[in-house]
Image (cartoon, helix red, strand yellow):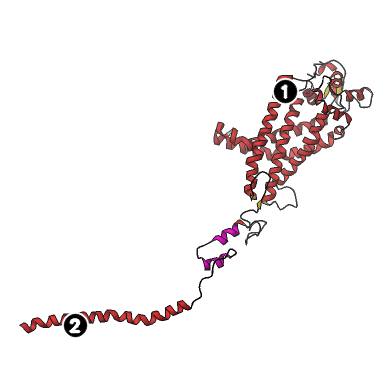
Amino acid sequence: MALSMQIPRLALPAVLACWLLLAGAPTRAQAPAAAPAAAASAAAPAAPEPKPDDTQAQRSKSQPGNNAPFWRAVRESGHQAGISNLPGAEKGVLIQPFVQYPGVRFNNAGEAWRQVRNRWILPYGGSLVVIALLAVALFYWRKGPLGADHGDAGRRIERFTPFERSAHWCNAIAFSVLAISGLVMAFGKFVLLPVIGSTLFGGLTYLLKTAHNFAGPLFAVSLLVVILTFIRDNLPNGSDLRWILSGGGLIGHAHPPSHRFNGGEKVVFWAGVLVLGVTVVVSGLVLDKLLPGLDYLRTDMQLAHMVHAVATLLMVALFIGHIYMGTIGTRGAWHAMREGYVNEAWAREHHALWAADIEAGKIPAQRSKSTEAAAPAGSMRTT
């Protein structure tokens, strides 16, 4: 019995020794295999050091997961376009090249354009329009309508022919539609949107944008007709300088004499109609992509937009004064453009040199064959 109890006690250490021997066998078996792997790893070349001019493929080897070369290429795609399968210009350009516009920081062209528009054109252009409105309101409050009320007496003189009036009114109506729609699209979100809400404002701006696109061609054609029709009588002469220096009669008491159009009207014609008007039309045609031979890149459209906006705001400010003087600012001016005729007293007061040429027979008092020439003098008012 005692012998049988000792056999298991002797067998237990032997079993443990066998188990440890078997457990250590795989380790010893793997040791020869791990040695060649370590040797191979030591013999492999080290990863290259990252460089500033690495391509994305090179950077993925030196610093896997670092995509800086890719995004750097995206930022600089305006200078060196990327690869794209899409046809057309600028398809490989994700971000425009960096430019320096006056008054804004050095930035990519898209952001620079946005800064010029939001920091310069809109605030200063809007202020100019408001100043022009306040100026004519203040002038009317202090001075009232200029000129005397000459009534209906005297011979009637044809100031504008039916063709001239038609060209003027077509251009004036188109300009009014363009100016109102453009001002709403530019400043409406600051003035109208908080008042009428987004739904009504969205419908209004869509309607005005459509009207803007349809009125543009009418304005361009009628502008050309107006320039060709009135350019002869708007050629400058010596009396224009005297008229401008006297402020159109505001400096001093005597009204300066002028021909058919005075110095102020000629400034409006040359600066507003010819220079600014043509600039607005050409830049608008670029924005509508109607001029042949242009690539219409993003930079082209941004520059055209800035030129269009600046020229338009200057033109609106200038024509606020012109509209004021042609309606309530000067007695008889509105009826002259509406009906085409003035009387001799009005012509002598406002355009003495033109009235003198008519009295001398150099210019006919009736230039068209309109039936209105046979109407009696009392049938037309000039106030």
Q: What type is the residue that disc 2 sits on?
A: Ala
Above or below residue 212? Residue 382 is: above
* Residue situated furthest left in the rendering: 1
Write the start and end of the magenta stretch as one range. Answer: 49-74
Q: Earlier in the sequence, mark 2 or mark 1?
A: 2
Number of numbered markers? 2
As rendered, which of 296 and 98 lies closer to the eye?
Answer: 98
Q: Residue 97, how many percent across, how many down?
A: 65, 54
Alpha-carbon span between mark 2 and mark 1? 121 Å
Q: Which residue shows up at 68% across the image and 32% down it?
A: 129
Specify the label residue 139 is tagged with.
1
Q: Residue 190, how many percent across, how many down?
A: 59, 35
Q: Quadrant of residue 264?
A: top right
Q: Quadrant of the C terminus?
A: top right
Q: Quadrant of the N terminus?
A: bottom left
Q: Which residue shows up at 75% across the image and 37% down it?
A: 219
| Residues packed near mark 2 inside 10 Å, few (<14), some (14 to 19) or many (20 plus) | few
| Residue 224 in view, yes or no | yes
Q: Residue 293, how many percent across, how many down?
A: 75, 52
Q: Which tag is nearer the camera, tag 2 or tag 1?
A: 2
Q: Are marks 2 and 1 in contact (CB under 8 Å)?
A: no
| Residue 181 in view, yes or no | no
Q: Does the stretch in magenta take in 213?
A: no
Q: Which residue shows up at 23% across the image and 82% down it?
A: 18
Q: What type is the residue that disc 1 sits on?
A: Phe
**What kind of element bears circle 1?**
helix
Left or right: 302 in relation to 371: left
